[in-house]
Image (cartoon, coloured by chain):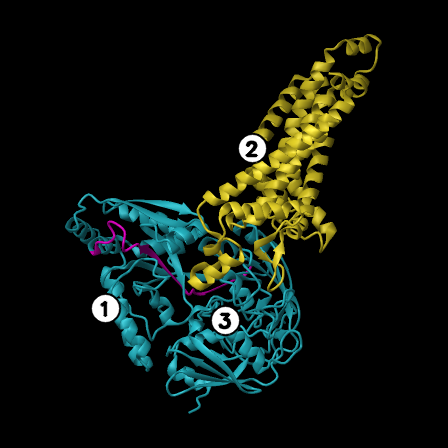
Chain colours: A yellow, B cyan
Amino acid sequence: MTYIIKKIATLIITLFLVSVLAFLAFQIIPGDVVTSIIGTEGTPEMEAALREELGLNKPPVERYLNWAGGVIKGDLGVSYRYSKSMNEMMPVAELIGDKLPVTLWLALFSLLLTIFISIPVGILWAGTKNKFLDGLLNGVTQVSMAIPAFFLGILVTFILGVVLKAFIPGAYVSYKKDFGAFLHYMIFPAIAIAIPKIGMTARFMRNSALTEIKSDYVRTARSKGVEEKRILFRHVLRNALLPVVTFLGMIIAEVIAGSIVIEQVFALPGIGRLLISSISTRDFPVTQILILYITFVVIVVYFIVDVLYRVLDPRIREE
Amino acid sequence: MKKYLTTILVTLLTMTALCGCAGGTGASSEDKPSKNATYGGTVVVGIQQDIDGLDPHKVTAAGTKEILFNIFEGLVKCDANGDLTGAVAEEYSLSEDGLEYTFKLRPNVKFHNGNTVTAEDVKYSLERVSGLLDGTPLVSTMSAITAVDIIDEKTVRVTVGSVNPELIYSFTAAIIPAGSGEDENADPIGTGPFRFKSYTPQEGIVIEKFDDYWKKGFPYLDEVDFKIVGSAETAIMELKAGNIQIYPYLTDSQAEEVKSTVQVLSAPSDVVQALFFNNAAEPLNDVRVRQAICYALNREEIIGFVAGGDAAIVSTAMLPTLTSYYEDLNDHYGTTGNVEEAKKLLAEAGYPDGFDLTITIPSNYEYHMQTGEVVVEQLKAVGINAKIDAVEWESWLSDVYTDRNYQTTICGITSDMTPGYLLNRFTSDNKKNFINFNSSSYDDIYGNILEAKSLGERGILYKELQKILCDEAATAFLQVPVLKVAMSSELDGYTFYPIYVQDMSTVYYTK
């Protein structure tokens, strides 16, 4: 119990610190949201009216407290930039709610790909005695991890989109419009996200399995004459998975928080792209909430993994 | 004394057609529907950036105005020749002293909500943009309006505080239903050929045909989907795949790449690109230094590099297509670079070995960035050690444009069709004078223009202003780039305007 309270306290303190840092960063970076909104044709009257409207004529501390007070009460504020109707700005909650499914589906797809490919590959890799295969997997996983994300995105676009014509690059379809077409398009960015994760997880799985293979219970199983495949999948896999769960947790946190680069390359209107555009347009309310969202996801997922780990491995619980 | 719009415009505000439609479409602002056209269909237009709002009086981005042009109309409207024609107003007259505009409304113009436009709506809209409603003018030129009076159901009189022969262009400001600017949940409602359907941030805006549009026979299309493209590269791929039908922002190399699959139309843009000097910053406060840079630039080479030679070289802030006002000053500094003259002037100014120079460029404009790279090389030849400082657009707006804290910058000024718009920014106390140009003779002549009544008189004075800018080397003007639009071969009717708009009402699928 004290453990959970401690974790929640950490969460709150971290969120507070992150929000203060993000707020400060916005005070420091060049470019002013008011001059940016009114553009090159603004008059001093328009500037003053807008500053008043956005509450930017108040001192920074007051502005921060107003904002934080709203968030605590569940009011995430309204965007400076995105309109909902002619006279009303888009509430941040609605804006993010609209973009979240894109990122979550992307996360789900890439995770499924990662889990279903990397775990069997990793365990078989650990069991193989074929030097060539070992070398090949070593090379391929190494390369998959080394390619920068944006380049991988372009590569997937080029090979699957331009050469094989499996999809039309950039032809994103909204999930509200045609869910099937949406899912079809999402497969390709998911592949681009999954490739390096598969490489990493497979290597991790292999190393973990190799350690297990050396243990006594494997030797016992072998001496009993248990088939090698059965040893790998029945005995080694379960034990070797434990550390991999932690690792997958980190990956989950990373993709749910938004895959900024891949969303950019594939023109996906998700959380990552929203973050980039709201920073560049100085849309403070949106940026601030997105940063808090990402922080929240990372901390909570790590927390869940932590708990899960304790459930799976009684040895940790006892400590 | 009542003049009808058409005659007034021919005599008073003659502007020559900018429309140079290549590609053989021959589209024009005909008032009659084309015989070759079919009705119906949906067109997807690729756009590069998200819109900055849905309130026609408040949006500032050119990328938003070009879309809203289809939804909203003013009392008058710009046509493809750069002339004003009646829209919500059928005709107007101007009083002898130039201080009273009387607009006669076109009968039965309908808003998208089905209501007929009334004098009340016009009064409300004009009071909203001029600041009479709440003290904040939304269109700066309109702050000249001192009163809007309803004469009868179909007649509105506008009184202004000072004479401005170019003010009529500001009456293109959108007419919206009375009260809609305060209504919280109002959808954007105008009188244009298309009505607003939906907007999704980061994805785009969809408009649909307005059946009760006052101009019979228009528009042709049922729906237009302005879709935000991820990047220029994906736009080209989508264009080739037939996923988008119109993409209006091709670069020279992209035009080459797509011309085998789609039509490429082109016309001069309404942007004057220049290497702007901060006239108050060292060493650019010395006229000889500014002149030296003007001499150093080989503009033939610049347009060769960035536009495949397809742009008009200019040496003034005026668009060559505004023929009544444009002064060709290209011979003054030459267009191919004069290194000796530049070096001589630099030596006289006390910089025989050149100096360090920073060129601040908003990095989202690929065209300006490429121009900057050529400029840097050309300045090197005369000993000036220039470097590019690429900044975000938001930083550029606040540091360069608003705070004027820079040495030089490359950007473009987009015209709004009035010559005054292009030249008034160089008067010394103008808020938009971001180059800190300060010339009392310039200010005096500009003052005379506001009093000059005839077009001929104003034309002469505007040309004098341009000569001053050139002699003083206020800025190194470079070029007027060309617009290149990709359009599916099944479509026709695309119309170029001398202002930056995407008029979808004339576009149709061919039989």
Which residue corresponds to the image point at 40% horizontal and 82% vertical from the top-left? Answer: B99
Badge nearest the viewer, 1 or 3: 3
CA distance for labels 2 and 1: 61 Å
Residue A40: horizontal and vertical position, in percent?
Answer: 43, 60
Residue A239: horizontal and vertical position, in percent?
Answer: 76, 19
Residue annotated with mark 1: B441
Tag of residue B129: 3
The 10 Å Cα crowd at callout 2, few under 14, some 14 to 19, many 20 or more, is few
Q: Place residue A9 in its image quadrant.
A: top right
Tag of residue A270: none
Name the one closer to the observer, B207 or A11: A11
Please, is residue B216 above or below residue A236 in the view?
Answer: below
Which chain does tag 1 point to?
B
Q: Residue furthest left?
A: B348
Mark 2 element type = loop
* Circle 1: residue type: Ser
What are the residue bounds of the magenta stretch? B262-287
